[in-house]
Image (cartoon, helix red, strand yellow):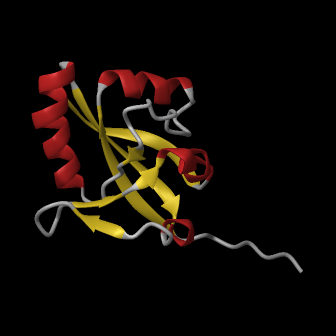
Amino acid sequence: MHMTSQQATTTLWRPTGPKELDLVRELNWRAWPPRLPEQPIFYPVLNEDYAIRIARDWNVKHDGAGFVTRFEVESEFLSRYPVQQAGGQTILELWVPAEELDDFNAHIVGEIQVVHEFR
């Protein structure tokens, strides 16, 4: 019996600067690079507007450019990470410990896409 299971996915966004984006490109748009020692947590967000705000207001100021990426992750896998409310109702993040990032990357479905760019 042949079963094709179409796994449910959840759309996540991540505001990022040019350096991180270059590393994602080197990983063929399939994975997020390992965290730096001062980055113990990987923060994808659940809301496009929030990601835009960070990329535009923070990344541009600190890195000269800000990008918003969008990607899909298997919903079942994501259920292990409780949604964190980091402010207002739309400011929702997942907190993925750096040491779990390889596992997280393995559950990304398709490619990481750049959907907004600010300079």
Rendering quarter of residue 38: top left
Q: Which of 27 and 91 is in front in this view?
A: 91
Count of labels shown? 0
Is 35 above or below relative to 95?
above
| Position in image of residue 31 (x %, y %) | 54, 39
Q: Which residue is drawn at 27% across and 33% down?
A: 67
| Position in image of residue 90 (x %, y %) | 16, 65
Q: Residue at x 55, y 72 (%)?
A: 76
Image quadrant occupied by the C terminus: top left
Q: Residue at x 50, y 58 (%)?
A: 73
Q: Residue furthest bottom?
A: 1
Q: Nearer the viewer, residue 71 or 103?
A: 103
| Position in image of residue 115 (x %, y %) | 30, 41
Left or right of 57 on screen, residue 85: right
Left or right of 34 on screen, residue 117: left
Can the viewer see residue 1 in this picture? yes
Left or right of 92 on screen, residue 110: right
Image quadrant occupied by the N terminus: bottom right
